[in-house]
Image (tube, rainbow, N blue to C red):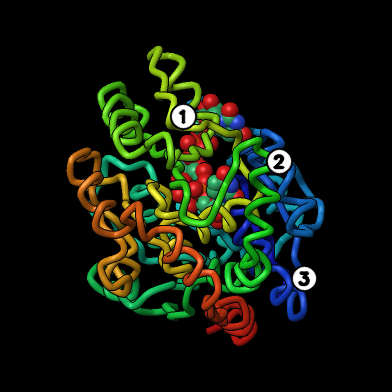
């Protein structure tokens, strides 16, 4: 099949890196990057690191409001899809680039394939929830990562075209996780960041949800990270540029125990997660990676779409929202300071993460047209 795939954000570049090798064995891909993310550290660097091919078309339409982004993406995508006449348009996840790709294709009568279909937070205040719901209802192929996602689709009356394929990001995490098990990799990342990093001797954090950029929420998670950090156990916060803008706008800064670093490469992100005492995040991707790596994880949102990640964590993943006291208590339980180093070393030494096989399943389902 001839497939136009549409990406635009950091996690979509990572998902494309996981799918492309299998996809390109069986199909012809036209690779389109909307440019929703545009900083070198959020986008450009991943092409080199993950050996992604240069996009066939780069739309350069990052920034602006949601309406501005969507309008610009739709305007750019329509002539490309009209000229390419693909058999399918493939989109990943739940960003504005996902919705734009799906909508542009559906309006032209081109079948849509949605990777990570069926996820729901049941919170329509989240821009991602709107993007997911609309994309799923426009899709012909719905590649669900989890049984819960399949059930969510069924509740909305969508059963045709749904395939449970597993989690594409696990395919990549399995490969790269094995490459970053050696604590020497952590030390190397630490040297590059100019922070002394020992297994279990720090916590790793990322924050970028729109809700968590609101003034009250900003102050709440900054206080939470400050409460969790200590001189002997810093929090390394890989700061999304949108969150940095929000902190500056509000004049809020983190305390000395929180070491703010630029967005990291994928290997560094995985290395920091694997060897951390714990991960604190509102990211969907980081949350699942922490679960696969076995690292204790506090989810800094009131809800999660990744129900299975929490259920299968054996209590190591806890949805704490922005409740500071709960976060401190859960960390004391999950990663006690006197045992965290041994726990992290043991975890890295015994890591045995297997690929989910999602890339193969998606490429072959597209081939059979089912
Ligand atoms: C987007 C997705 C979110 C996803 C996240 C992954 C939507 C609605 N949201 O959120 O689902 O989890 O990507 O990281 O699509 N910015 C830069 N440089 C960049 C990118 C962003 O400075 O390279 C700043 C800009 O101020 C921009 C802001 O971040 O306005 C928000 O960026 P945007 O792409 O709209 O949303 P994200 O918060 O990145
Ligand atoms: N990630 C990264 N560098 C960072 C933070 C995250 O490479 O500084 C990776 C992370 O390992 C995961 C993906 O980015 O693979 C998650 O993307 P993000 O948190 O931006 O979006 P979400 O998953 O919430 O949509």
| Location of residue 78 in the rendering, given as x and y in whole percent from the top left corner | 64, 46
> Would you place residue 134 above or below residue 190 in this image?
below
Task: Give the residue at mark 2.
Answer: 192
Residue that extends furthest to the bottom in the rendered view of this protein: 368
- The answer to whether residue 343 is visible is yes
Q: Is residue 137 left or right of residue 17?
A: left
Which quadrant, please, contains the N terminus? bottom right
> Which residue appears at 29% of the width and 56% of the height?
304
> Quick one: 36 or 73, which is closer to the camera?
36
Task: Give the residue at mark 3.
Answer: 28
| Location of residue 361 in the rendering, given as x and y in whole percent from the top left corner | 57, 82
> Which residue appears at 74% of the width and 44% of the height?
45
Q: Are marks 3 and 2 in contact (CB under 8 Å)?
A: no
> Would you place residue 2 above or below residue 262 in this image?
below
Residue that extends furthest to the front in the rendered view of this protein: 338
Q: Is mark 2 within 8 Å of ligand 2?
A: no
């Amino acid at each position: 099949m001839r497939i136009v795939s549409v990406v635009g954000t950091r996690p979509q570049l990572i998902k494309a890196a996981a799918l492309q090798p299998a996809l390109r064995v069986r199909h012809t891909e036209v690779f389109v990057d909307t440019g929703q993310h545009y900083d070198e550290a959020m986008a450009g660097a991943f092409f080199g690191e993950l050996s992604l091919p240069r996009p066939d078309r780069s739309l350069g339409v990052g920034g602006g409001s949601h309406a501005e982004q969507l309008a610009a993406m739709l305007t750019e995508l329509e002539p490309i899809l009209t000229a390419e006449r693909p058999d399918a348009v493939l989109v990943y996840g739940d960003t504005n680039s996902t919705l734009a790709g799906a909508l542009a294709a559906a309006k032209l009568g081109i079948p849509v394939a949605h990777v990570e279909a069926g996820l729901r937070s049941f919170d329509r205040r989240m821009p991602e929830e709107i993007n997911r719901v609309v994309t799923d209802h426009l899709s012909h192929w719905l590649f669900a990562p989890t049984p819960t996602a399949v059930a969510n689709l069924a509740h909305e009356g969508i059963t045709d075209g749904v395939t449970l394929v597993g989690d594409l990001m696990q395919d990549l995490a399995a490969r790269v996780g094995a490459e970053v098990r050696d604590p020497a990799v952590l030390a190397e990342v630490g040297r590059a960041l100019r922070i002394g990093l020992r297994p279990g001797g720090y916590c790793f954090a990322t924050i970028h949800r729109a809700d968590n950029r609101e003034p009250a929420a900003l102050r709440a998670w900054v206080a939470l990270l400050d409460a969790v950090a200590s001189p002997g156990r810093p929090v390394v916060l890989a700061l999304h540029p949108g969150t940095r803008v929000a902190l500056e706008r509000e004049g809020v800064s983190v305390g000395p125990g929180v070491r703010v670093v630029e967005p990291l490469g994928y290997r560094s992100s995985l290395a920091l997660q694997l060897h951390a005492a714990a991960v604190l995040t509102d990211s969907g991707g980081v949350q699942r990676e922490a679960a696969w790596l076995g690292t204790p994880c506090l989810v800094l949102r009131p809800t999660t779409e990744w129900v299975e990640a929490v259920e299968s964590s054996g209590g190591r993943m806890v949805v704490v929202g922005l409740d500071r006291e709960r976060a401190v208590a859960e960390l004391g339980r999950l990663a006690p300071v006197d045992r965290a180093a041994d726990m992290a070393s043991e975890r890295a030494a015994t890591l045995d993460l297997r690929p989910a096989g999602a890339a193969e399943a998606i490429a072959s389902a597209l081939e059979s047209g089912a």
